[in-house]
Image: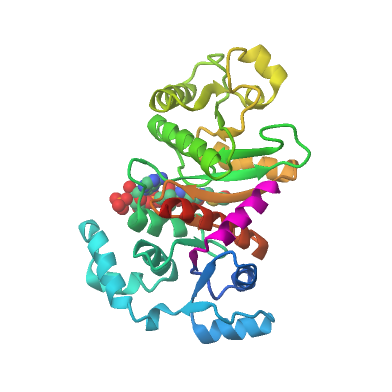
Amino acid sequence: MELMNKLFEAAKANKQRIVLPEGEEQRTIIATEEIKNQGLAYPVLIGNQEKIMSMAKELNVDLSGVEIIDPNSYEKIDEYVKAFYEIRKNKGMTMEKAEKIVRDPLYFGTMMVKLDDADGMVSGAIHTTGDLLRPGLQIIKTTPGVSVVSSFFIMMVPDSPYGENGMLLFADCAVNPNPTYEQLAAIAIATADTAKNLCKIEPRVAMLSFSTMGSADHELVEKVRKATELAKELRPDLMIDGEMQLDAAIVGKVAAQKAPNSQVAGRANVLVFPDLQSGNIGYKLVQRFAGAEAIGPMCQGFAKPINDLSRGCSSEDIVNVVVLTAVQAQAQNK
Ligand code: ACO
């Protein structure tokens, strides 16, 4: 876990304000104490102050010094409602609807990030991925020059020779159900940049398929082939190759047979799946069968960082995602 140790140190060195909209949730309250005690970020909890403090007492958690905001009594709520209405008025938003929507903790937290009252947001212990993504997509939107928000997992496979000593990035396993070839190319590029900037590794990106370098012909393969060509064209500085099967991507011997001229085959450390079904199933297979730790899903491509949790997450997972979000925020605030 050398990478996580480095990221913890980076988070501490320049503390960011991270909003946690699920402030009334047990694991979030426990994680908040840990974040505060380790000095990893300035956590902000959304919810009812009395309820949160009484839960904290029951859990024997010390939240002294932690900011708690209740949207219903927040002094800037009118400003938030007006700003949200302005952002969404072309999509049929009315002031009346905005008054209600902005008080929803996820929309409220997203507006805090949008209006620079927070540097990033982490949620999803009790909400679905879609619940978190929708306000993000509507309000925060993508970084200029980035066409699509997507997600990645950092997979830590114990005692494995594959990838970067067992560490690989998987994308997109949580956001885009059926990306076009242009979107798939954008996902590959975004994940390569994440590997470089966040994980500090030289990315070798495999565009996965059921075919290796033309061994099969099908419209699904064609999509991956076109995405690979486009990604290479857009970013000739990156090592991106495909289409290839999973074994050709990570196993040297198979790569030598199936894709002998590829710089990526046999030593890929970034795996790009052709759609969400394969990506989501793929990461869960590795997590369950290989006992891999799956950190994420982390979002990439948002103009400011907001990140999701799995509903089965532990308070430790929440701390990890807050740290990663804080490091993303540091990079974006530069
Ligand atoms: N990148 C950028 N913008 C996007 C994206 C994207 N990937 N997807 C949608 N948008 C935009 C739309 O253009 C739209 O913009 P606008 O309202 O300003 O015009 C806005 O976001 C909202 O779009 P909708 O069409 O209303 O949202 P949609 O219903 O498509 O939902 C969502 C988007 C939530 C990402 C959906 O695709 C989804 O549910 N994805 C799967 C999530 C999921 O269930 N993941 C698996 C579980 S996670 C796990 O197991 C770890």
Q: Is residue 263 above or below residue 10?
A: above
Q: Please say whether residue 5 is one of the residues in the magenta stretch.
A: yes
Query: As rendered, which of 309 and 332 lies closer to the eye?
Result: 332
Residue at the extreme front of the image, as rendered: 13
Q: Nearer the viewer, residue 214 or 136?
A: 136
Residue occupying image coordinates x 54% and y 77%: 66
Whether residue 171 is visible, yes or no, is no
| Left or right of 203 on screen, residue 90 | left
226 to 3, vertically: above or below: above
Report how many numbered discs are placed on residues in the image: 0
Residue at point 40%, 56% (across, down): 136
Q: Given the current orientation, which residue lies at the most extreme left position?
A: 90
Q: Residue at point 30% right, 74% down? A: 99
Q: In the figure, is residue 12 to the left or right of 229?
A: right
Q: Residue 319's spot in the image, x, y percent?
A: 62, 62
Expressed as whole percent of the image width and height from the top left, the position of residue 226 reads 42, 23
Question: Which residue is at the front of the view, 228 or 90?
Answer: 228
- Which quadrant of the structure image shows residue 203? top right
Colour approach in the figure? rainbow
In the image, residue 40 lies in the stretch drawn in magenta: no
Residue 189's x, y, as percent? Answer: 46, 34
Residue at (60, 86) in percent of width and height = 54
Q: With respect to residue 308, does 146 lie above or below? A: above
What stretch of residues is rendered in magenta? 1-18
Residue 296 picture location, percent across and down: 58, 51
The secondary structure that most of the magenta stretch takes on is: helix
Residue 173 visible to an observer of this rendering: yes
